[in-house]
Amino acid sequence: MTTTVNPYGFRRPHLLGIEGLSKPEIVDLLDRAEANVAVSRQANKKRDGLRGRTQINLFFEASTRTQSSFELAGKRLGADVMNMSVASSSVKKGETLIDTAVTLNAMNPDVIVVRHHASGAVALLAQKVDCSVINAGDGAHEHPTQALLDALTIRRHKGRIERLTVAICGDILHSRVARSNILLLTALDARVRLVGPTTLIPQAFRDMGLEVTTSMKDGLKDADIVMMLRLQRERMNGSLVPSVREYFRYYGLDAEKLAYARPDALVMHPGPMNRGVEIDPAVADGPQSLIREQVEMGVAVRIAVLEAVTGNRNASAVESAP
Ligand code: ASP
């Protein structure tokens, strides 16, 4: 079988964010991920794209979906996957991020998947190691594989991203998911609307010329996609919302508010969900919800990204060999 290389496709050795990626690069990653969906649904899910390779998952922040999804993706590709548990590592003894990275690098991994609470930490780490690095979420900065899996889920249901109206609702201020999604969806020519209390919408996004509203009624009007975000109370210094009850009343997605959107609107949430805070359980589990499918697409996207970055790293090593 001959595989054609897309010259405008994704050729980078790392995936540090959506920022700076071109539309063809994003589409290339989505197309590669799409091809993995069927494989992940068959009985034999094993491939050999990363056979003999070593993948380290280095998570400094709690994660259920992302870490397990990267682990499964690596294993399905045949890699040896090591999960570094920060709770029991030298990080607890005061080792810096860079020392940890340099130590792991000495074990010759092929790819390190990193989640860190500081924005920019993953890009810094990528400069210190010889392998590919994938950002699995850095502070409030970016979560690129989440945006890719969201886009894949949308594209599979709506057939396109272009010209869709996507309402991103809730705690945008603390959300790396919102940031990566805004960058990706606008790069693919969707109309993005931000909906939430003024205290939870950063000025930087207002300056980007996006539609911003504090009213769910206005924000959801004619929306094709309603993307809810978790209220990230662990990142809040001081009180940015009056109370959880009030928040649910004005911004929690229930059937009544969802009725403002198009009748065929679809509901998304990156998880973990706070049921009864930003979303009513009846909507989260209802017929318009894509939340479980987002998790499935996460594995397909991470397989594509792992294969792409490691392949690109090898290709550039071969190209630069004497
Ligand atoms: N799981 C997502 C993240 O890591 C969203 C969230 O935590 O609310 O950013």
Image (cartoon, grey):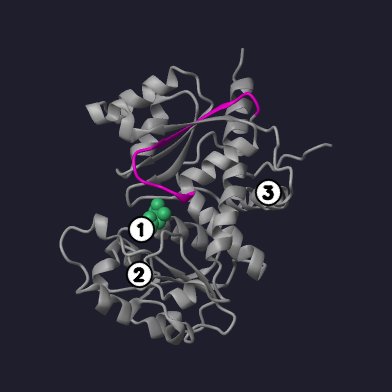
The residue pinned by badge 3 equals: 40
Query: Are the two marked residues, 3 and 2, in contact with CB atoms closer than 8 angstroms?
Result: no
CB within 8 Å, label 1 to label 3: no
Which residue in the rendered view is the most extreme toward the right? 1
Q: Find out whether residue 55 is within the magenta segment.
A: yes
Measured as percent of width and height from the top left, residue 129 is found at 43, 25
Q: Secondary structure at mark 1?
A: loop
Q: Amino acid at mark 2?
A: Gly
Instruction: Choose the circle earlier in sequence order: 3 or 2.
Output: 3
From the top left corner, tell me how far across and down residue 304 is, in percent.
62, 43
The yes-or-no answer for disc 3 within 8 Å of ligand 1 is: no
Identify the mark nearer the N-term, 1 or 2: 2
Q: Answer with left or right where residue 277 lies relative to residue 18.
A: left
Q: Is residue 25 left or right of residue 133?
A: right
Evaluate if marks 1 and 2 touch, with contact meaning CB atoms under 8 Å apart.
Answer: yes
Across and down, in percent, residue 207 comes to: 33, 65
Going by the numbered disc 3, the residue's amino acid type is Ser
Q: Residue at the spot x=32%, y=30% of the render?
A: 88
